[in-house]
Image: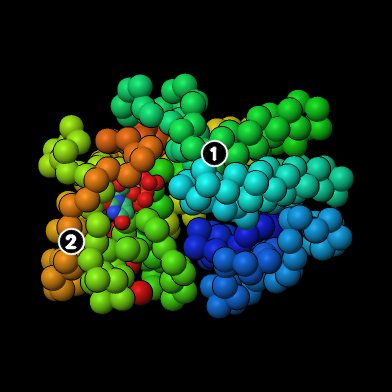
């Protein structure tokens, strides 16, 4: 297949590029390099520099005869989306609509969306499956839900088949050690723990230890990025073969606490990793765990590298 990864120079995009190349697909990367890095793009990808907000560069890249587009070009900081919603409306919603309409105009019929567990909001039950009500707690989550809604309409009206992949907490680095580009200014737990381990941050702030969880700290479902990347390839192949849209959760189906992550990082790195308990972060649920039964059934997907040891060691080695 010929696949264009829009936002392919970012953390998940570059791992997804590796997975498509490993499957002998032809890969293009479209990116404006605002947060992604050229150094992240694996050899063998054709690079198109451009912006989803710029119709001309987008049309030029989309008209190169792609079988599928994978859309990973979005801002993703939930906290920031509440402070600067315009930034998220513009890029995540208007930019996605430019891309979707560009695809139909250029005859591209398969679309894979980086979606998020943030579409669900505060969980009403666990594990969260795809029928769980969607009620985003932050504007970032709403932008993803809104794009899913547009895709459903374009499926009905224009036969654009889509796979919406609702990621839980992406973590780790390429299992074969091919990825060296680390994220700039990370806000997520594991990269922050690692920055503290190497001394570029003074201490880890633990956002609350009074949750109703195994040790009082927040519990999340961490999914290794190599497993996530593999799901994109399977989704593209599924759309190609079945011509039927799908929405699936991608998670490991197990919950890890902040304290467990910290303890494992201390063990693997051999560093002290100073930490201090602070107040809860606004909008943080106590516990999020996915059911990925649907992805397993539909795509034959199975997380292979999402155990705590592999997630932490593949991050520490970068
Ligand atoms: N967390 C923390 N300190 C940090 C960053 C995150 O204690 O510096 C906690 C956060 O409260 C949550 C978990 O780690 O319980 C995962 O947070 P992250 O921001 O990585 O992902 P989110 O679940 O918000 O998407």
Q: Is residue 106 left or right of residue 234?
A: right
Secondary element at image label 1: helix
Above or below, 59 relative to 161: below
Label 2 beta carbon within 8 A of ligand 1: no
Measure how far apart labels 1 and 2 are at the Cα level: 30 Å
Q: Which quarter of the figure is the C terminus placed in?
A: bottom left
Q: How is the image coloured?
A: rainbow
Q: Which residue is mark 1?
A: 139
Q: Name the residue rendered at 24%, 61% in the picture.
A: 204
Secondary element at image label 2: strand
Please state which of residues 46 and 133 is positioned toward the viewer in this rendering.
133
Q: Name the residue rendered at 38%, 29% in the picture.
A: 122
Please state which of residues 121 and 264 is positioned toward the viewer in this rendering.
121
Position of residue 73 measured from the top left corner of the image (x, y, whole percent): 62, 55
Position of residue 113 measured from the top left corner of the image (x, y, whole percent): 61, 44
Q: Name the residue rendered at 22%, 50% in the picture.
A: 278
Q: Which mark is residue 275?
A: 2
Residue 116 can be seen, yes or no: yes
Please state which of residues 226 and 38 is positioned toward the viewer in this rendering.
38
Whichever of callouts 1 and 2 sits on the residue coming sooner in the sequence is 1
Position of residue 163 measured from the top left corner of the image (x, y, whole percent): 60, 39
Mark 1, other Cα within 10 Å: few <14 / some 14–19 / many ≥20: many
């Amino acid at each position: 297949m010929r696949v264009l990864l829009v936002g392919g120079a970012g953390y998940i995009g570059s791992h997804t590029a590796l997975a498509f190349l490993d499957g002998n697909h032809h890969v293009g990367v479209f990116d404006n390099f605002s947060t992604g890095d050229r150094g992240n793009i694996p050899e063998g990808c054709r690079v198109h520099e451009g912006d989803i907000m710029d119709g001309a560069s987008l049309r030029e890249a989309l008209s190169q005869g792609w079988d599928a587009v994978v859309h990973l070009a979005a801002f993703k900081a939930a906290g920031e989306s509440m402070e600067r919603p315009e930034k998220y409306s513009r890029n995540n919603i208007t930019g996605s609509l430019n891309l979707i309409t560009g695809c139909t105009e250029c005859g591209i019929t398969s679309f894979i969306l980086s979606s998020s567990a943030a579409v669900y909001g505060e969980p009403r039950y666990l594990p969260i499956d795809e029928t769980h009500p969607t009620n985003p707690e932050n504007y970032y989550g709403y932008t993803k839900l809104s794009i899913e809604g547009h895709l459903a309409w374009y499926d009905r009206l224009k036969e654009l088949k889509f796979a919406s992949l609702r990621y839980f907490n992406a973590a780790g680095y390429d299992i074969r050690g091919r990825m060296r580009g680390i994220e700039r200014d990370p806000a997520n737990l594991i990269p922050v723990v690692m920055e503290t381990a190497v001394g570029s941050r003074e201490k880890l702030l633990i956002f609350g230890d009074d949750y109703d969880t195994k040790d009082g700290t927040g519990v999340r479902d961490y999914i290794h990025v190599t497993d996530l990347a593999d799901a994109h390839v399977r989704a593209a192949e599924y759309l190609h073969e079945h011509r039927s849209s799908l929405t699936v959760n991608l998670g490991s189906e197990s919950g890890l606490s902040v304290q467990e992550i910290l303890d494992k990082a201390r063990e693997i790195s051999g560093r002290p990793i100073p930490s201090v308990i602070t107040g809860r972060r606004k909008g943080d649920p106590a516990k999020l765990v996915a059911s990925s039964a649907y992805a397993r059934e539909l795509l034959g997907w199975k997380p292979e590298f999402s155990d705590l040891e592999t997630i932490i060691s593949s991050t520490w080695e970068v």
